[in-house]
Amino acid sequence: MGGWLLAGLAVVAVVAGLRVDLMEVDAAQYASMGQEMNMGSPWMALHEHGALYQSKGYPDKPPLVFWCAAWGTRLLGSTAAGAKLFSVLMGLVGIWAIGRWAGALMGPQALWPARLFYGVNLGTGLMLQDVRTDTLLVALVTLAGWQAQVWKQNNRPLHALAAFGFTALGMLAKGPLALMALVAVHGGDALWSNRYTLLRRPAFWWGLLWMILLLLPWLGALWEQWGWHKGVRYYLWTQNFGRISGENPWAHRADPTFVFHNLLWSYAPWSLMLPAAIWHALRYRNWNSETVRQALTAWALLALGLSLSRFQLPHYVYILWPFQSLLLVRWWLDEDRRLSWSRPLIGATALLLGGGLLLCDFAMGTFPSAILLVLVLGLLAWLLRSKLPALVGKATLGWAGGGMLLLLILLNGLAWPVLMTYQGSSQLGRWASQKGLAPVLWRWDCDDESVHALHFYTRRIVPTLNPDSLQVGQTYLVYSGRSCIRTLQERGFKVKALREIPTHRVTRLTPAFLNPKTRPQVTGVSGIYQIKP
């Protein structure tokens, strides 16, 4: 499939993802806090809902993702596209950079395979729609790795400064993990090749100083607000490495198979080939390859660290993307794999595409066109089974990439917009703004619901209702779940529903919720109510 056609499909998928509502908790939180910055909240002393930002008594995340949301909403207003804009643009730059990195290591023939492996999979599709700190982290680590490789080859100090600068920005996105990834990449190369010449270059030390200078304002802000233990030490050690040692307050959900079962779905369809690429790197002549020395060392160390971590979430595996993509390119180019992998790769992509269509059908409650399409494609594949490898030929990666981009277009354009209508905080926040009710809106929360999107779409920090301090006879406008409103009714409050919608935690999809027939059984109800004590 032609490169320009793939690029066009990618643009459609990204634009469709920008329009999807902000998901609770993370993306909506970044947008809400970024909007607070535009309303006057300090950019270094991070605030959430008017109070000092923290999680379990510690500053939870570095500031870059919030700054990106603030810049985007200042440019495009309080919209999902504005909140995501700069994170998504950085993610796209990372896809471009992995091609340049692969090209510097393996020649121009590696450029497009690397970009397909890195940028066209389920995980990247989600990462560019439901933005996380990892969206910035992975892109900046890729940029830093590429610039460090160029510097190693041409010894121009500007590239060293760029590599350390991108590393500093990566640390402002998600802490020292960015630095550790780069140390693993180029330190692994130096260890296996027994060459440590980089340390003798003056540009290395100037670059290190440049990185420290970029980090100093943030470190100073942490010291001023939180002191050494809760601020600086937490950022430099506890937040990342404390998950392995157990010092981090978020220390549960440990799963030794975490990396592998999350790679299976999130790196699809290329996860099908990843074991072969890793085995190829371990077994054959590639220990003399700079690509393998860099990528395999970094991948193995990061995968081990993630497996040992005592707190794990699926998007944490995204940091492995650049390194496993380089390993796949090395394996793909070493021998002609196109014909032997055409059947399984195209078959896996077709199954994923059929599954995506089925998800769209269930989300929209329409006739299951996916089943019909899969049956037709299956019959066609069976009839052409002997000719399929020749038909796909050298364009195997292009066909698989095109299928994945079509899947992402379907998910971003059809499935997610429908499913997001069940997120009450965004839907009712937008409705309140359209009706001019946002300035007088309160929220009553008795079930620990995340309402960052409510703050964002109402363009204000919606205050929490205290029923004991309300004036008798006064009418109040309240956002809440129906179950919480019942507690007010039991206390004798008069309640009138202005608007109610079925709600569900969209990031926790279950078969019962996806099935339109059982969906009403597992959804709650949220609404905007008039209450009178």
Image (spheres, rainbow, N blue to C red):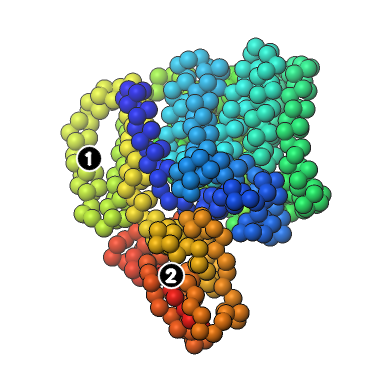
**SS at badge 2:** strand
Residue where numbered disc 2 is placed: 528
Q: Along the polypeptide, which appears first: circle 2 or circle 1?
A: 1
Q: Is residue 252 visible?
A: no
Numbered mark located on residue 378 in the image? 1
Can you say whether 318 is above or below 254 in the image?
Answer: above
The one of 55 and 201 positioned closer to us in this rendering: 55
Residue 6 relative to residue 258: left or right:
left
Please name the amino acid that badge 2 sits on.
Answer: Ile
10 Å neighbourhood of mark 1: few (<14), some, or many (≥20)? some
* Horizontal and vertical percent position of residue 341: 36, 28
Q: Residue at x 77, y 22 (%)?
A: 206
* Horizontal and vertical percent position of residue 75: 51, 40
Please name the amino acid that badge 1 sits on.
Answer: Gly
Quarter location, residue 303: top right
Q: Residue at x 32, y 37 (%)?
A: 406
Can you say whether 277 is above or below 79 in the image?
Answer: above
Q: Is residue 157 visible?
A: yes
The one of 226 and 10 positioned closer to us in this rendering: 226
